[in-house]
Amino acid sequence: MKIGVLGAGTMGNGIAHVFAQYNHSVVLVDVIDSALSNAINTIEKNLNRQLQKKIISDSNVKKSISNIELSTKINSFKSCDLIIEAIKEDLNLKSKIFKELDSICKPSAILASNTSSISINSLAKSTNRPEKVIGMHFMNPVPMMKLVEIIKGEKTSKDTLELIINISKDLNKIPVQCNDSPGFVSNRILMPMINEAAHCYNEGVADAASIDSIMKLGMGHPMGPLKLADLIGVDVCVYILNVLFDEFKNEKYKPSDILVNMVDKNELGKKTGKGFYNYEF
């Protein structure tokens, strides 16, 4: 299959990486030239890291890079069979993009979103092919994480669902299906945990390292919730919590004051150098 990936950020370049590694032709599109050059550099660096670990061969690295085409034009997706949108979490922007993709892409093309919280049904309504709209929520870092959360919309067809499940397996991923609902399964459960950890930190119950150590050593989590918030981005966590709060009208989803204050101070975690922890660039 020929794959289109829209958005060359962390998730987009990771998605392009795994499809190219498993011998799919990939068109990676972003409106910013520098984002594309950064993306291909990141992909090459991560492929070489896999080479050093003897996960792939030198020929795999070269072949994977050659499988990726870069473009700043969305009409480059015209010949793609599957397009995966991986832009920022903004319903209006995503809806506009899906409407444009619907008009550009061939009728048989499947339109998928890597959204972590936005309704697949809402995105499907922006198109004339709701049966071919689906969620493919990859986990970060994409080349390493096995899960792909597959979100079925109300009108997603059985054929679309089966194809996406099968192609996920072809990427050596483990697809797990759920139905469309705010936050799906992953973030509906994860974000309240991060929020509660932030409450504990804010109330002085323990410092960040202690909270994370307790959850790692006592609960078997590979990464503590506050370190994970820094990795995801505190702003992204707040956005998703607000989506959940707006949809469910339940106070347990309301972002904690400290998370909101951190966003106001641009303390977003790893990407800004400061969150619950400090990071060096």
Image (spheres, grey):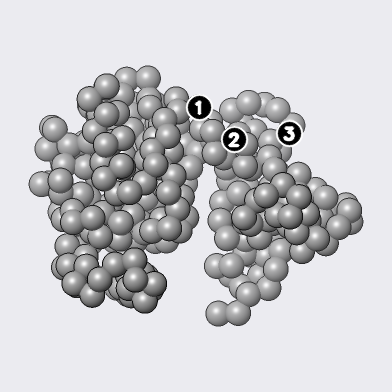
Q: Secondary structure at mark 3?
A: helix
Between the C-alphas of marks 1 and 3, the distance is: 17 Å
- Amino acid type for the residue under numbered disc 3: Lys
Residue at 58%, 46% in the rendered image: 239
Direction from residue 166 to residue 243 in the image, left or right = right
Task: Using a 10 Å C-alpha cutoff, classify the residue at mark 2 as few (fewer than 14 neighbours), some (14 to 19) or many (20 or more).
Answer: some
Q: Position of residue 76 (x, y in %)?
A: 15, 54
Q: Residue at x 63, y 75 (%)?
A: 279
Q: Which residue is mark 2?
A: 188
Disc 1 marks a residue whose amino acid type is Ser
Residue visible at 33% across and 29% down in the picture? 124
**Disc 2 residue type (three-letter):** Arg
Whole-percent x and y of residue 142?
A: 41, 55
Q: Earlier in the sequence, mark 2 or mark 3?
A: 2
As drawn, the residue found furthest toward the bottom would be 281
Q: How far is the residue under mark 2 from the one under mark 3?
A: 11 Å
In the depicted view, which residue is nearer to us: 172 or 152? 172
- Residue 56 vertical position relative to residue 114 in the rendered view, above or below: below
Q: Which residue is mark 1?
A: 181
Decide if residue 123 is on the left or right side of residue 3: right
The residue that label 3 is drawn on is 252
Label 2 or label 1, whichever comes before in sequence order: 1
Q: Which residue is rendered at x = 67% and y = 49% of the image?
A: 220
Q: Are marks 2 and 1 in contact (CB under 8 Å)?
A: yes
Judge the density around disc 3: few (<14), some (14-19), many (≥20) Cα neighbours within 10 Å: some
Position of the C terminus, as image quadrant, is bottom right
